[in-house]
Amino acid sequence: MQPVIRIRNDALKRVMEHAAREPQRECCGLLGGRDGAITQAFAATNAAADPAKNYEIAPEELFRLMREMRAGGLVLMGVYHSHPNGNNEPSPRDIERAYYPEAAYFILTAQPRPAPIRAFTIRDGLADELQIVVE
């Protein structure tokens, strides 16, 4: 049985809207929640040198978003980004830069197969898919 990650519909909608606003760039952000469910999406600016192929959240923005999350009584539960021109499986770079082993990594794509959004745990260089339950 596949492990599950729970996310509120409004948070998922915000993530998908963010990706739609930046169709040629990898969008990115953080996902906060509590009680085992993601309740809020925190959009970030992609500061990567080549935002069409990679994503990076600048340290200052990352710290600001983490403080904002904590101030709202939330914990980091996930990180999201899009792959505008590819599938939504973690790339070798995504796996290498998965700095939060307890977080779920959501990857969006414009390609409908197998699904427009998928989530993974990434630990010790291995990615395992999670079942997304939308609440």
Image (spheres, rainbow, N blue to C red):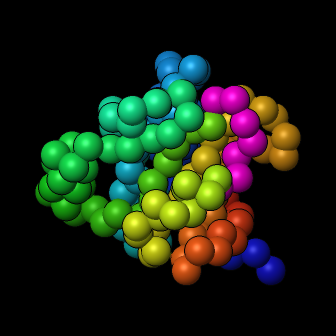
Is 50 displayed left or right of 47 in the figure? right
Provide the major secondary structure of the magenta segment. loop
Q: Where residue 75 appears, x then y in whole percent?
A: 31, 66
Q: Quadrant of residue 76?
A: bottom left
Q: Residue at x 63, y 64 (%)?
A: 120
Q: Residue at x 49, y 48 (%)?
A: 80
Q: Image height check: is 8 above or below 95?
A: above
Q: Residue at x 70, y 46 (%)?
A: 88
Q: Residue furthest right?
A: 113
In the rendered image, residue 92 lying in the magenta stretch gets the answer no
Is 123 or 66 nearer to us in this picture?
123
Q: Image height check: is 11 above or below 123?
A: above
Q: Does the image show residue 35? A: yes
Q: Residue at x 33, y 44 (%)?
A: 57
Residue extent of the magenta highlight = 84-90
Q: Where residue 9 appears, x then y in whole percent?
A: 55, 44
Is 95 displayed left or right of 128 in the figure? left
Is 27 or 6 nearer to us in this picture?
27
Q: Where residue 18 appears, x then y in whole percent?
A: 48, 29
Q: Quadrant of residue 112?
A: top right
Q: Where residue 126 appears, x then y in whole percent?
A: 64, 74
Is the N terminus in the top left, top right, bottom left or bottom right quadrant? bottom right
Q: Quadrant of residue 73?
A: bottom left
Is the C terminus in the top left, top right, bottom left or bottom right quadrant? bottom right
Is 71 displayed left or right of 106 in the figure? left
Is 59 or 63 nearer to us in this picture?
59
